[in-house]
Structure formats: structure tokens, C-alpha cells
Image (cartoon, rainbow, N blue to C red):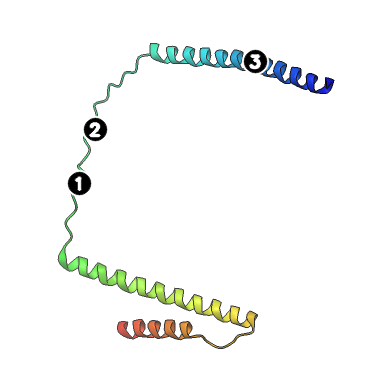
Amino acid sequence: MSQRDNFAAGFIAGSVFGGIVGGVLGAMLVSRINHQETDEAKTPIVDETPPEIKPEKGKKRQIEPGASEQRIEMARRSLEEKIAQLNQTIDEARQQLAKVNGNSTLGTSDTASATLRDRALSRDA
């Protein structure tokens, strides 16, 4: 029973002591923050430079019809080349995994991706 009484007394004493220390630290921090804010308020902020006029962002630039078609075609070809490279890398990774797993045959998904890749390449030629 005495151990319980000591625990309760220690808990209450620790709570009171912690509350006092926390209150003192909080008051000190608040006074420092208020002191810094008053120092900043005393110094005037003077900006003598006139504000810059920025162009409107809502306007879109005009694209020439012939140039845009060329850009679109170049972008399409570039994307198709990147897709072909990714497909090749995926196929190589699948083959390596198949060797590790002991399956060296191509699945239906490999055949389908190869067919799609062949169609894309034949379209460019």
C-alpha cells in the first residue's frame, strides 16, 4: 500500500512540477516572439521600385498549321521509338526471368506484344 501512495504522490508532484516548468518556458518563448515582432514592426518597409507589369497568362500562342503537323509527326515517331525500346526491354526481362524460373517458352502476352510492336514498325516504314 505504501508503494501505491508513493507512486500517486510522485505522479502528482511530477505533474505540478512539469506544469510549472512548462508554463515558465512558454512565457519566456512568448515574450521573445513578441519582442521580435515589435522590433520588426518598428523598422519601416520601404519599397521604392515600381511594381512590374506581368503579361497575361491566359493568352495562348498561335501555332502555325504546317509546323504543328510536323511537330506532331516527329513527336509521334519519337514516342513510337520509345515504346518499341520499352517493349524490347520488357521482352528481354521476361526472357531472363523465364530462364531463372525454368520456363523458356513465350506466353500469349509475349506474342501479342510482339505483334503490336511489328504492326507499329511496319506502319512507319
Mark 3 to mark 1 CA distance (whole Å): 57 Å
Q: What residue sits 52% from the left and 87% below the top?
A: 106
Give x and y (percent) for residue 107: 51, 85
**Quadrant of the rendered image containing residue 125:** bottom left
Q: Is residue 81 above or below residue 49?
A: below
Q: Assess whether mark 1 and mark 3 are in contact (beta carbons under 8 angstroms).
A: no
- Category of crowding for the residue at label 2, using alpha-carbon neighbours closer than 10 angstroms: few (below 14), some (14–19), many (at least 20): few
Chain-order first, disc 3 or disc 2: 3
Q: Which kind of residue does numbered mark 2 sit on? A: Glu
Q: Nearer the viewer, mark 1 or mark 2?
A: 1
Chain-order first, disc 1 or disc 2: 2
**Quadrant of the rendered image containing residue 52:** top left
Q: Nearer the viewer, residue 66 or 81?
A: 81
Give x and y (percent) for residue 111: 45, 86
Give x and y (percent) for residue 3: 83, 22
The answer to whether 96 appears left or right of 2 in the picture is left
Q: Which kind of residue does numbered mark 3 sit on? A: Val
Q: What residue sits 22% from the left and 38% below the top?
A: 54
Give x and y (percent) for residue 74: 29, 71
Q: Nearer the viewer, residue 91 or 76?
A: 91
For disc 3, the marked residue is: 21
For disc 1, the marked residue is: 58
